[in-house]
Amino acid sequence: MGIQGLTGFVEERGAFFTELRVRDTKLVIDGSSLYHRLCFASAVDFRRGGDYGLFAAAVRDFFGSLRACRVAPFVVLDGGRGADDRKLPTLRGRATERLRAAHGLSRGDGGCLVPLLTREAFVQALGRLGVPFLQCFAEADREIAGLANRWGCPVLSLDSDFCVFDLAAGYCPLNHFQWQSVCAGEGAQGCYVPARCFSVEKFCRHFGPLDRRLLPLFAVMNGNDYIDVAALEGFFSKVRLPRGCASGRGGKHLRLQGLLHWLSQFAEPTEAVDGVLKCLKKHQREEIRELLCASVEDYTPSDVKLEDFFQNGKYECEAAQKAGVPQWVLDALAKGKLAPFISDALILRSTFLHVQVENMQRPSAHSTALPIRQVIYGLLLKVAQNAKAASPSKQTNELPVVCEFDRLQKTLKKTSVQAASLPTDFSDDHFTLDKLMEVPMSCRQMLLLETLGVRMSFIESIPSHLQLPVAVTCYWICCSEPKVNLHQLKALLLMIVSGELHRITSDPGRSPKNTILIDSIAYNEFLKWKEKKLQNKDFDLDAAHSFCQWQCCLQMGLYLNQLLGTPLFEPDLSSEDSLLPLSRLYTGTLVHRLYQELKSAPAVENLFSFSQKMTWLYQILLNTVKSAVPPDCFQKMTKTKSESCKKKKASNKKKKPIRCAISETQHLCNVNRFASLGVDE
């Protein structure tokens, strides 16, 4: 949530804060605020789809600072939109704002846009770092406030709503939490994070004094994510608000200050509500009274005992129980093993697809992943196989429909999408969502691979933690429009190989001793190339659009794999690297630079020639993908006369190029070859 203008108002003054040294305490963290803050502060390249490695490092360093100060973090994330979907108008507005930001970035303007997989990357990082976290069923604010009060510890967030909650140990804004400047403590007390805590007492004393019980009413009347202030325009047009501190810096916050001064004349909330209703027409009063009273409840700390989850994994939420969601789904949602996208599709039959920096003249990048989403909807909403046989008019009624909010050129559009019908194992009369995990794993794996259009025989020679990304890549090539350029595929695979090389050199204990030195040399050579080449600022919007499509496919491939109980390993399960696994799968600046290099200097394919292991990995990834997709799936590449001459000269050189084709027999033998080279799964 958020109260319009309040953050800017309190920041301008600074007098509403007290200094705080954070150490030797529990700390309840608003996870959604934190990953947004770390993303924006980690200097990621928002234009090229995200540098998840930099974000990963920021996440690791943040929690490292807390550990050094003996701070025990407990992260609470927002879940889905909730069964009442009260924030829908606000979310539509924010989606429109993101769309404008993406369009600006696509044209070269400045700005920030959270990369598509940031939330998934953050959840993976929390698991890798061993940070306790919970994903709530819906909005997390009330649960965060309740947990912090029961533990008597501060809340760390960047949400102005926490200025209104009655918090026992206060609210620490993230922009005043100096985790990068840990200070040495005096004596035995140890180091601490310098911070500032919002003081409700100072704030209320400034206005009247104002009874702090009136702050929720102020939040509602000033405008938050749940109520449109236009509903109270009748009040604001008739009441004469005090001018307050209208001069100077406070001029742009006239209504906010005036409303606070006006409320200070009342002793308690009921009296203030009556004062509001007196300014309205009689036929409006009861409706507005109910609206105000219901909205004020949003600022009452929840009595849901999140501490039970952090102690024994038990999360009981009345709203979740009422929604009729199977218990295994609720448990997976709470543990972050399923995304809020899943609960929104299941409960609301409505989802938001987040825009990226795309070519706005082309269809949305999410269009490529539509068939994957339809299978997800089919599993969630149980579509019978025999629905295919129905007449077109009847079929529309029988197939469940999910409303997707996605872009149409530069505007937000709602589209109705039919769920896919499913194979027999998932569509007989006895199958329901609560029995999905009872379906044999082999059947669930087959459904995943059939959806991605890949046979297991093609990817079984790939290291297990890369099988899902490779299958997704095959799907991307077959379904993208316009077709994928071969240089784009090679750039993606080289990027993945660079991540694997980083993983191995970061943890030499997982590789044979005789390859450690060679791998280190190869990685150092790669870093030299990367340092030199990443300075290029060229930007290819069509290539960016294609890589956006790949991220959309990967996101939905991850979601489908999670919903099916992970029949394929997720990219992080085979890694002991302390950095974020997704950081090895996608680095926007690197993949764009590799693509630019491949167009002018094909020899960049030999980037890892110092390491036989990495050379083989690249060969096998490339040939696996090429053997799994029809040749006509690739965009035809035209060569100029000069490029043809260069290629002819290069072929006459003694140095052997990277091999680009292997037989299926060789392909099936690559597992043993990987083992002999030390490429572990």
Image: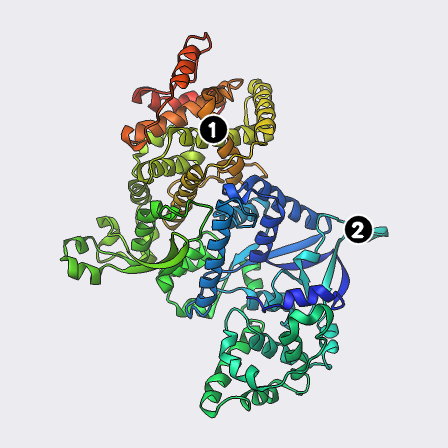
The residue wearing badge 2 is 190
Q: Say whether residue 31 is visible.
A: yes
Q: Is residue 204 left or right of residue 582?
A: right
Q: Circle 1 — which element?
A: helix
- In this view of the protein, which residue sits in the foreground, 242 or 307? 242
33 sits to left or right of 393: right
Give me the residue at 44% from left, 12% from top. Answer: 650
Q: Quadrant of the N terminus?
A: bottom right
Q: Is residue 34 left or right of residue 116?
A: right
Position of residue 292 measured from the top left corner of the image (x, y, whole percent): 52, 81
Residue 594's place in the image compared with 336, above or below, is: above
Foreground: 40 or 680? 40
Taking depth in this image into account, of 184 and 94 the one nearest to the observer is: 94
Q: Foreground residue, 397 or 147? A: 397
Which amino acid does the dot numbered 2 rest on? Gly
> Residue 494's mark?
1
What colouring method underlies this structural image? rainbow
